[in-house]
Image (cartoon, rainbow, N blue to C red):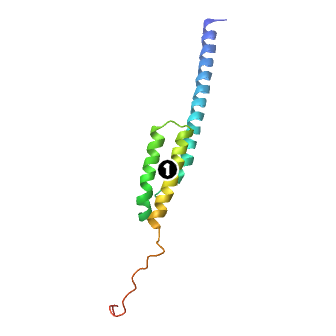
Amino acid sequence: MSREREELRVDKRTEADRAGLTRMLASKRKREFHMTDRMMQFFEYGHLPDKLKAVSKQFGVLAEWICDTLPSNPERTVALRKLLEAKDCAVRASIYKDPEYQPPKPDKENKPA
């Protein structure tokens, strides 16, 4: 086999190996992103009213930090799930209405005419 032909075969194999490796890495990144994306959808806060947005945003920022800092593994998922549970509780606490609280009724004498 000629030297040129042998070099061409090596180049093709190397390119094929590189393409396979690139596909494998892209697939792995896509899976990791999908896992992160799947959990992060619950930490979105842009659509919320201002009162709820102020509460929810803090949890979203922490969730982003967790995903950016910690490796993707079952414990990170548990951390995100528990953070999500805490966020839900905090949002509900911000809209909680005390059943015993009675707002003052307007006084008929001080009512504007």
Where residue 30 sits in the image (x, y, percent)?
57, 38
Residues packed near mark 1 inside 10 Å, few (<14), some (14 to 19) or many (20 plus): some
Q: Which of 32 and 9 lies nearest the eye of the viewer?
A: 32
- Quadrant where the C terminus is found in the figure: bottom left
Q: Residue at x 46, y 72 (%)?
A: 98
On the question of residue 44 being in view, the answer is: no
Q: Residue at x 55, y 43 (%)?
A: 77
On the question of residue 89 being in view, the answer is: yes
Where residue 89 sits in the image (x, y, percent)?
49, 59
Q: Using the image, determine if residue 108 lies above or below residue 43.
A: below
The amino acid marked with disc number 1 is Leu
Q: Residue at x 47, y 61 (%)?
A: 91
Q: In the rendered image, which residue does mark 1 sit on?
A: 83
Q: Which of 23 and 59 lies nearest the eye of the viewer?
A: 59
Q: For the residue labelled by badge 1, is the local secondary structure a helix, a strand or a loop?
A: helix
Where residue 21 sits in the image (x, y, percent)?
59, 26
- Quadrant where the N terminus is found in the figure: top right
Where residue 94 sits in the image (x, y, percent)?
44, 64
Extreme residue toward the front, this view: 100
30 to the left or right of 104: right
Q: Using the image, determine if residue 89 lies above or below residue 70.
A: below
Q: Which of 28 and 92 lies nearest the eye of the viewer?
A: 92
